[in-house]
Amino acid sequence: VITGLEEDGSLDIQLRPADGNWRELSKDVHGRHFTALALAPDGESLYALDNLRSDRIGLYRLALTGESYERIYEHERVDVNEAVMTADGRSVFALQVNDGYPRYVIFSRDHEEGAVFRELLRTFEGSMLSLLSRSRDGRFWVVWAGSDVDSGSIHLFDRERNEARLLFRTRPGVDPAALSSMQPVWFETFDGRLIHGYFTPARSGSQARAPM
C-alpha cells in the first residue's frame, strides 16, 4: 500500500493485491485519517486506523483488492490513540485508548506479545508501554515504560522470573517525584456535548483555589 496527498489535500491510496497491478482505492471507501499499520496474518488484507463515517478513529481491516473495508474496533467516546505493534514491527496486537487514563485493548491471541503485554501491564501499572525487542527464545524483552510524570525508562523484562530490571532513564535529570500528575476531567455543555480535558494541580499541596 502507498499513501500520499493530492494537490487539493485529499488522501490518495494505492493498493497492489496478489495480481501485482496497482489500483487506486476509491475515496468513498476510506475516511480522512487513514493510516496503514501492517499486513494481516492472511497476507491479503491490512490493518489501518481510520474514521470512516465516524467522528472517532478506530481500527479497520482493508482487503488489498479494495473490495471490503471492515471496522474492527471503535471506542464509544474517544479515538484510538495508537496501535501497539509486535516487537518486529510487522503486526498489531493491541490498541491504546486514552479514555481519561491510558488503557489497552488486547485483541490478538495469535501473538506471544499479547500474553507478555498483559504481564507487563500488571508490572508497570498505570504506565504507557511499548515493546522494543525480544530474545529469540522469548524469555527476555526490552520494554519502554512512561507516564505523565515519567518521560520514559527502558527495562529488561525476564519473563521466566517475571522480573523487570531498569536499564536506563531517557531523562535522568528529571525527577518524577517533583512532577504533578494530570487528572482527567469532563463536563457537559449546554447542548449536551461532553467535553474532556485534563487538570494538573500544583505541587504546593495547598487546598486553596489556584489560578487557571
Image: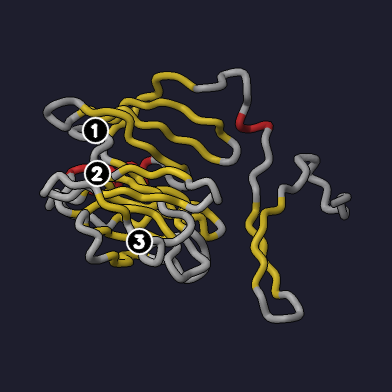
- 186 or 122, nearer to the observer: 186
Tag 3's secondary structure? loop
Locate residue 12, reporting x and y percent.
41, 50
Q: Is residue 145 left or right of residue 15?
A: right
Tag 1 residue: 88
Disc number placed over residue 204 in the picture, else none: none
Q: Is residue 155 left or right of residue 210?
A: left
The label nearer to you, 3 versus 1, is: 3
Asked where in the image residue 135 lies, by quadrant, the reply is: top left
- Residue at left offset 33%, top offset 42%: 2
- Residue at left offset 56%, top offset 21%: 171
Local packing at callout 1 (Cα closer than 10 Å; few below 14, some 14-19, many 20+) is few
Locate residue 77, reporting x and y percent.
52, 68
Tag 3 residue: 26
**Amino acid at pointer 2:** Ser
Tag 2's secondary structure? loop
